[in-house]
Amino acid sequence: VHRLDVDTSGAIILGKSLKGFLHLRQSFKSRQVFKEYICLVHGPVKKLSDPVHAPIQWNENTNTSSISDQGMWAESFYTVLGRYRLRGDKHVFTLCRVIITTGRTHQIRVHMAHIGHPLVGDSKYNPHAQNDLMWCPRVFLHAWCLG
């Protein structure tokens, strides 16, 4: 019924019958499904809660998304859950809860990078992701709640 990025863990919804599948597909299409994620990002996110409104355009040739005026409308809302440091390190990480209204490809990854806080382990949208691999071998993004 819906998709998660390959590196994203967490909840998915399946239709057990054709009728259930069609109902769920229509619910996603009409934005009636609540989608909540947890992610760890680089840096201290200053605002405790804020919306991100930025259109996203998909590039099939590079398999990446980007913020673009030619893109499709996309909306995310984040809330800071906590801030952390690795032992003996000064670099700050922020754990965020992100609710998305739309479901664009790589939406959370692109939106958080757009506001200056790329996801830990995200080699597509974080040029310094190689440093994360020692302690986080994949993108730190989890589909927490669907409803």
Image (cartoon, rainbow, N blue to C red):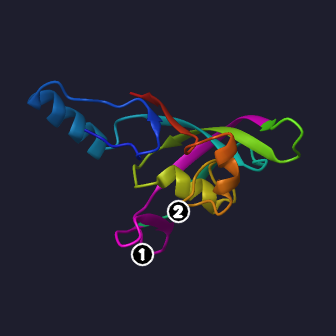
Per the image, label 2 sits on a secondary structure element best described as: loop
Q: Residues within 10 Å of mark 1 (few under 14, many from 20)?
A: few
The dot on residue 5 is none
Question: Residue visible at 66% across and 59% down?
Answer: 115
Q: Position of residue 139 (x, y in %)?
A: 55, 45
Q: Residues within 10 Å of mark 2 (few under 14, many from 20)?
A: many
Q: What residue range appears in magenta? A: 58-83
Per the image, label 1 sits on a secondary structure element best described as: loop
Whether residue 32 is visible to the viewer of this picture, yes or no, is yes
Q: Quadrant of the C terminus?
A: top left
Q: Position of residue 19 (x, y in %)?
A: 11, 29
Q: Quadrant of residue 111?
A: bottom right
Q: Which kind of residue does numbered mark 1 sit on?
A: Gln
Along the horizontal axis of the image, is 2 left or right of 5?
A: left
Residue farthest along the top direction in this orientation: 16
Along the horizontal axis of the image, is 65 left or right of 45?
A: left
Question: Residue visible at 12% across and 26% down?
Answer: 17
What residue is disc 1 on? 70
Residue at mark 1 to residue at mark 2: CA–CA distance? 11 Å
Residue 132 included in the magenta stretch of the image: no
Question: Residue visible at 22% across and 40% down?
Answer: 26
What residue is disc 2 on? 54
Q: Quadrant of residue 25?
A: top left
